């Protein structure tokens, strides 16, 4: 069924619009909503048939809208998603899904109560690189993962924070951990499962902001794999990299910062005699879509009753749980165990 969409927020919403536009048989963008009329109308003008409104209530009261796509600052995500569910809409929500585990659990409860679906945005999952690695894991060639490294090394100069809510606890609710490395951490968990323990150190070293712009994490996955995550917004250029050492091979992602799975990855067999087997299997992996387009296609399939590759509400909660553990460890100076229960000091939020 073709879904009618309203994009709420014309900043990152412009990239969402491009993703929807690539799937005209699945989506129709009817409305762009933004408090900045010039920005909102400019984006609406790029989409044939789309109109502009400045008030979210106009979106939620429109019976033609099936999906409310929330592209607002993080502190507005939970409230807007709850209102959209209450209005009978399905929801797409940019990262982070929520600003605390208690908010994430409220969204899960409201979703169950209303029957409305929420799809957290993790578009990095989609692309040939991830398809290749998943195929090798599913085949058994990979075996256990021993260890790995993640790098989110991006460049965010002072001008990036000219947007008022960025770099603040009140508006952004976190820094490089929550707003930037959240994507590569989702890749890790989608491949290896839940995190069991994290030890974190964070710092503000690059810009004069409230939130962290550097972090170093030591992570133990539930299956025992040991992974480090290095995060900074003070790099020369922008690089994302995932490198995992499995029993059968070592894999290294492409380094594109915002689409690391969009190209094929490098797989090197531990036993050189097995390289031919790995290469043969990789050659048979079907080509897959990438980025927002593939994310929205998986979302449409789920709404049509064919779930499989969509990002779930539980996936979004898991990303918030990891962020809670990271900030908890950074504040206490001690490792944090997962899962996190409702009695945790940061269950209701970590923002100061």
Image: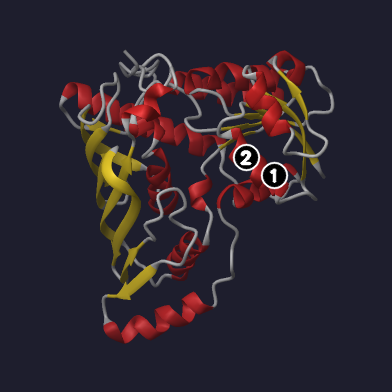
Compared with residue 50, is residue 55 higher up or lower down, i.e. above or below? above
Compared with residue 7, is residue 124 higher up or lower down, i.e. above or below? below
Contact (CB < 8 A) between labels 2 and 1?
Answer: yes
Determine if residue 56 is in view: yes
Could you tell me which residue is drawn at 47 percent across and 32 percent down? 317
**Residue for badge 2:** 16
Q: Position of residue 220 (x, y in %)?
A: 25, 45
Q: Secondary structure at mark 1?
A: helix
Q: Quadrant of residue 204?
A: top left
Q: Quadrant of residue 181?
A: top left
Q: Which mark is residue 220?
A: none
**Residue for badge 1:** 20
Q: Position of residue 329 (x, y in %)?
A: 22, 28
Compared with residue 195, is residue 126 higher up or lower down, i.e. above or below? below
Could you tell me which residue is drawn at 70 percent across and 14 percent down? 55
Name the image quarter holding the C terminus. top left
The Cα–Cα distance between marks 2 and 1, rounded to whole angstroms, is 6 Å
Q: How is the image coloured?
A: secondary structure
Which is nearer the eye, 239 or 133? Answer: 239
Q: Secondary structure at mark 2?
A: helix
Which is nearer the eye, 42 or 47? Answer: 42
Name the image quarter holding the N terminus. top right
Compared with residue 313, is residue 281 higher up or lower down, i.e. above or below? below
Determine if residue 112 is in view: no
Which is nearer the eye, 73 or 138? Answer: 73
Q: Residues within 10 Å of mark 1 (few under 14, many from 20)?
A: many
Is 233 on the left or on the right of 297, as rendered? Answer: left
């Amino acid at each position: 069924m073709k879904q009618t969409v309203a994009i709420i927020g014309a900043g990152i919403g412009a990239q969402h619009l491009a993703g929807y536009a690539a799937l005209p048989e699945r989506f129709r963008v009817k409305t762009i909503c933004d408090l900045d009329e010039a920005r909102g109308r400019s984006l609406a003008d790029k989409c044939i048939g789309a109109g502009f409104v400045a008030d979210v209530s106009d979106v939620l009261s429109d019976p033609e809208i099936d999906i409310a796509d929330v592209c607002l600052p993080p502190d507005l995500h939970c409230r807007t998603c709850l209102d959209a569910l209450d209005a009978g809409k399905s929801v797409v929500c940019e990262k982070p899904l929520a600003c605390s585990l208690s908010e994430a659990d409220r969204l899960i409860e409201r979703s169950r109560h209303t029957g409305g679906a929420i799809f957290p945005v993790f578009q990095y999952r989609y692309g040939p690189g991830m398809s290749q690695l998943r195929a090798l894991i599913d085949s058994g060639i990979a075996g256990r993962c021993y260890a790995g490294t993640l790098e989110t090394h991006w460049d965010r100069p002072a001008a990036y924070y000219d947007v008022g809510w960025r770099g603040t606890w009140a508006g952004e609710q976190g820094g490089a951990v929550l707003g930037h490395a959240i994507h590569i951490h989702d890749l890790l968990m989608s491949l290896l499962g839940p995190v069991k323990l994290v030890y974190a150190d964070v710092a503000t070293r690059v810009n004069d902001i409230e939130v962290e712009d550097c972090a170093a994490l030591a992570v133990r996955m539930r299956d025992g794999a040991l992974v480090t995550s290095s995060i900074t917004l003070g790099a020369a250029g922008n690089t994302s990299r995932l490198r995992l050492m499995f029993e059968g091979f070592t894999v290294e992602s492409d380094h594109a910062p915002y689409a690391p799975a969009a190209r094929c990855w490098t797989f090197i067999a531990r036993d050189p005699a097995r390289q031919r087997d790995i290469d043969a299997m990789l050659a048979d992996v079907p080509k897959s879509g990438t980025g927002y387009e593939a994310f929205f296609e998986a979302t449409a399939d789920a709404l049509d009753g064919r779930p499989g590759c969509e990002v779930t509400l539980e996936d979004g909660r898991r990303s918030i749980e990891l962020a809670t553990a990271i900030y908890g460890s950074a504040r206490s100076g001690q490792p944090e165990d997962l899962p996190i229960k409702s009695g945790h000091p940061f269950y209701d939020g970590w923002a100061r």
